[in-house]
Image: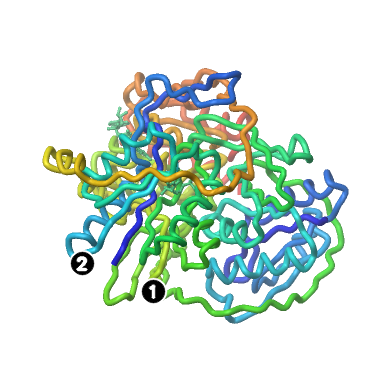
Amino acid sequence: MKILVCISHVPDTTSKINFVESDTKFDVQGVQFVINPNDEFGLTRAMWLKENQGALVDVINVGLQTSESTLRKALAIGADRAIRINAEPTDGYFVAKQIAEFVKENPYDLIIAGRESIDYNGAMVPGLIAGFLDIDYVTNCTKLDIENGKVILDREIDGGKETLSGSLPLIIGGQKGLVEENDLRIPNMRGIMQARQKPLDTLEPFNFSPNTSTLKFHKPEPKQAVKLIDADNLDELINLLQNEAKVL
Amino acid sequence: MAVITYIESSNGKIKKSGFELASYASELAKQMNSSAIAVTINCSNIKEIGKYGIEKVLKINNDLLNEFNAKLYSDVIVQASNNFDCNRIVLSSSSDSKYLAPLVAAKLEASYLNNVISLPSNLNPLTVKRTAFTNKAFSDCCSSSAKIIIGLSNNSFGLVENSVSVIEEDFKVNLVNSNLSVKSTEKSSGKVSIADADIVVSAGRGMKGPENWNLIEDLANTLGAATACSKPVSDMGWRPHSEHVGQTGKPVATNLYIAIGISGAIQHLAGINSSKIKVVINNDPEAPFFKAADYGIVGDAFEVVPKLNEKLKEFKLQNS
Ligand SMILES: Cc1cc2nc3c(=O)[nH]c(=O)nc-3n(C[C@H](O)[C@H](O)[C@H](O)COP(=O)(O)OP(=O)(O)OC[C@H]3O[C@@H](n4cnc5c(N)ncnc54)[C@H](O)[C@@H]3O)c2cc1C
Ligand SMILES: Nc1ncnc2c1ncn2[C@@H]1O[C@H](COP(=O)(O)O)[C@@H](O)[C@H]1O
């Protein structure tokens, strides 16, 4: 079984969000970049399939050279090979076209991406790839088991979960649940040493253009100070919620 | 060039978010001097959409569509929008609609702009405001594609009443069954889901242990609210994963978010920031959540929550 894990290179969740160049670009100054949390769950699940079912695991990123640190980390966690498509990941359409074209030339049985990336929150890359390649797709995936080519998955739905069965090839949008938080892999010394010997191939992008563009970013308006209400005066809270906030 | 929207239903009835979506689609159509069409699947109370300005409703009744299937549902939307030559497609931000949206986008070679929170500020190129960085910022995005899908953020637009008489039309679709099939569905029955709730009561590690969640559930029951929790609470197995809200959990965009014993870490706030009114109950006046809240109570949750619940019960009795 060949697995491709799509890795998005995103600012750490604690990052301060600021913009530069007249609010047209994200300010990377002092920002730590990490593997998108949803992709980390998928990558760890892929490691499990590698160790228990002999899968080969490649990771792919569409990004500039700055994302190589993130790909090296994925190799240190245990991926066999990394591919970087050398282009700025301007929008989800562009990224999905790049990955879909790559997969047309290099087929995989299973493609694991994240439900969404935490920077631009597109929630579209895996679904677009599925649409472009006409392969089955399940997102918000919280469980993935494969036996003799048969796939059993859980999908989180509003207010519960759904269990699905399907077959390969397949693409998923994964999230927490694919593996437990405590089982997430962190690179160890041996992994980091081995990663240096593993292939990290850089490919030039296929000829597609983004179909959206971002004109300007805004930061939220500063918030008004909180109204503190005495714990002995809960009637006041109810009054404010009813008459001022009008939410009761 | 009409606007088309897919109005979700559950058990044959339009979901509440469907009326907001209908409002948005018909206001968008007005802006474009056009009209709005709604796609409904196995749905019965269609007339009600007319209250929000939708003039034509397509009725699709097909047994293959009894259960949600992203591929089949996206095929329906693609066929309907092609048939009526619709270049603007409005979808909700429910998990189902977010699932099918990119499939529709790929089939139609359309642009997909999601997390949209307002009507376009410009129609050509279509320019909308969306949230980015999980609610830590906003962006103005545009697209010049011929076809564009707008994913509307829940609770960001509200309802706009504009009664019209609805033309209902049966619409036949061609469907090829998909490889993926649903084996079982587990829904916490009788409970409000976070996505559909007007009020969410959420609690964190300050509740000390799962045995104390009856306080949270009682309060939620009184308010008709959904329950939610912080990430460590679901990681420790005190509550199901599906209740975990925040940047790496579910987003919450509700009218009232009540946070109990939650410190207000940046990742938590990111996910709930687009809720309209935030109330925090925490015994530490320095808890960062107070900076993000509208109303705050410094106090012990174990005393405040039961008292608040009693008062709200009285309030509900008087106002029902
Ligand atoms: C990559 C990453 C992603 C993350 N994503 C998320 C996410 O999506 N969602 C999320 O929630 N977290 C997320 N976190 C975790 C986040 O950083 C915090 O650790 C977490 O939100 C804290 O949860 P808490 O507020 O329940 O617990 P704590 O931080 O321990 O806070 C408990 C609070 O309860 C108060 N308290 C204690 N006793 C009482 C009492 N008797 N009455 C009233 N108040 C009391 C305390 O004063 C304190 O403020 C993420 C972290 C990382 C690293
Ligand atoms: N630049 C990228 N390179 C590789 N994979 C990506 C990239 N951007 C997004 N993805 C994948 O697509 C998922 C969803 O991203 P998005 O559609 O941007 O929210 C992510 O979790 C990744 O798995």
Q: For the residue carrying disc 2, how many other residues have a C-alpha within 10 Å: few (<14), some (14-19), or many (20+)? A: few
Q: Give the residue type that dot 1 points to.
A: Ser
Q: Residue at x 36, y 32 (%)?
A: A33
Query: Is A66 left or right of B45, judged from the image as shown?
Result: left
SS type, badge 2: helix
In this view, A45 is above or below A19: below
Query: Is B54 left or right of A157, judged from the image as shown?
Result: right
Closest to the observer: B185 or A75? A75
SS type, badge 1: strand
Q: For the residue carrying disc 1, how many other residues have a C-alpha within 10 Å: few (<14), some (14-19), or many (20+)? A: some
Q: Quadrant of residue B316?
A: top right
> Whole-percent x and y of residue A49?
24, 62
The quarter of the rendered structure image containing the N terminus of chain B is bottom right
Query: Is B201 left or right of B204, judged from the image as shown?
Result: right
In this view, A246 is above or below B84: above
As measured in the structure, the alpha-carbon distance from the residue carrying label 2 to the one carrying label 1 is: 16 Å
Closest to the observer: B310 or B27? B27
* Residue A160 seen in render: no
Q: Do pointers 2 and 1 mark residues of a single chain? A: yes
Q: Residue at x 70, y 69 (%)?
A: B79
> Whole-percent x and y of residue B289?
41, 27
Q: Quadrant of residue A25?
A: top right
Return the residue at label 1: A167
Q: How many marks?
A: 2
> Whole-percent x and y of residue B22?
72, 54
Return the residue at label 2: A53
Q: Is mark 1 within 8 Å of ligand 2?
A: no
Chain for disc number 1: A
